Image (cartoon, helix red, strand yellow):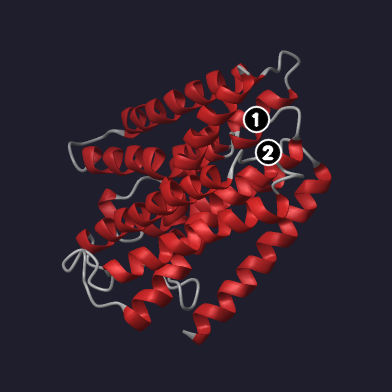
């Protein structure tokens, strides 16, 4: 537990420093793009290391596909035809190019009928499970074209709520957890931990609304903030369980041992992959509704 707390604080401090620097650079926040790209790349390589050698996609192919999905949409902000809609078009094109790149790579180097399908399946899964969610989440600031500070705050909240939920679930489950909800998939997950994590995620959103709601108007009412916290926290929990499914099927406890107390990079970002994607959907709906009034 001590290692988890220490390294958790170190990562939080490092993340805060990078966000502060990116805030000075301004929209489209390139440092966060590079940070997400690096985290995704390491997460994919962690999963790759758990597969038999013959079923591992080539490292350069992984680098290319993750770069296309996550970094390519960044280019639209520097194009002379920039508009909000263009980022989504480019993202769709980037996704299609990354998915087809896997096929093209296997076609180019296909020599005999062995393990092409497992390699291709792994690469496509990595693009859709890790690369696409992160690329989508990075589009959140684009929903606030007139207020970059609100866009950055929305992106941070989308990432922090699932992680705060993780913290609440961990400590609640550790001290008062009794009722297992996934005894085979993840035996340490409990109903009490689930409820504690969701409660802490909702509390974070309530405090954000209370302290910063007037200067950063992401939520219209207190109930709006609590609803966001509820849905994003639940999404984070299922994102965590999704990674547990992969690890259980690959017969490992952690994606790697890179971060003491946590495991690997994927063990850190797993809840964000789904939780923050749900946050994007929330802001898409609420900002669209607000624009009509």
Whether residues under marks 2 and 1 lie with C-beta atoms below 8 angstroms apart, the answer is: yes
Please state if 180 lies on the left or on the right of 131 as rendered: left
Residue 260, horizontal then vertical, whole percent: 49, 78
| Residue toward you, 28 or 178 | 178
Please state if 269 lies on the left or on the right of 120 as rendered: right
Element type at mark 1: helix
Residue 277 against residue 7 in the figure, above or below: above
Give the residue at mark 1: 142
When asked about the image quadrant of residue 198, the answer is: bottom left
Residue 158 against residue 168 in the figure, above or below: above
Residue 139 against residue 175 in the figure, above or below: above
The structure residue drawn at horizontal position 71% and vertical position 13%, both measured from the top left corner, is 81
Mark identifier at residue 151: 2
Q: Is residue 238 visible?
A: yes
Q: Residue furthest bottom?
A: 2
Residue 190, horizontal then vertical, whole percent: 27, 70
């Amino acid at each position: 537990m001590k290692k988890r707390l220490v390294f958790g604080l170190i990562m939080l401090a490092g993340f805060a420093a990078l966000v502060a620097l990116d805030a000075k650079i301004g929209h489209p926040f390139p440092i966060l793009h590079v940070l997400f790209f690096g985290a995704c790349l390491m997460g994919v390589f962690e999963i790759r290391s758990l597969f038999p050698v013959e079923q591992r996609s080539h490292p350069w192919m992984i680098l290319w596909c993750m770069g296309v999905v996550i970094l390519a949409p960044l280019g639209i902000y520097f194009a002379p035809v920039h508009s909000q809609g263009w980022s989504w078009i480019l993202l769709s094109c980037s996704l299609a190019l990354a998915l087809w790149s896997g096929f093209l790579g296997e076609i180019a180097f296909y020599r005999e009928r062995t393990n092409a399908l497992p390699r291709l399946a792994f690469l496509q899964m990595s693009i859709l499970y890790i690369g696409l969610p992160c690329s989508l989440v990075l589009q959140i600031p684009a929903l606030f074209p007139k207020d970059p500070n609100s866009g950055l705050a929305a992106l941070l909240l989308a990432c922090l709520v699932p992680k705060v939920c993780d913290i609440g679930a961990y400590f609640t489950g550790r001290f008062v957890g009794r009722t297992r909800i996934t005894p085979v998939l993840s035996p340490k997950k409990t109903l009490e931990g689930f409820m504690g994590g969701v409660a802490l995620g909702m509390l974070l959103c309530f405090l954000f609304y209370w302290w910063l709601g007037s200067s950063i108007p992401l939520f219209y009412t207190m109930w709006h903030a609590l609803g966001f916290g509820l849905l994003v926290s639940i999404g984070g929990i299922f994102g965590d369980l999704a990674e547990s499914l992969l690890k259980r099927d690959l017969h490992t406890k952690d994606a790697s041992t890179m971060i003491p107390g946590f495991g690997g990079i994927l063990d850190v970002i797993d809840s964000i992959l789904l939780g923050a994607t749900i946050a994007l959907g929330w802001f898409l709906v609420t900002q669209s509704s607000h624009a009509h009034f």
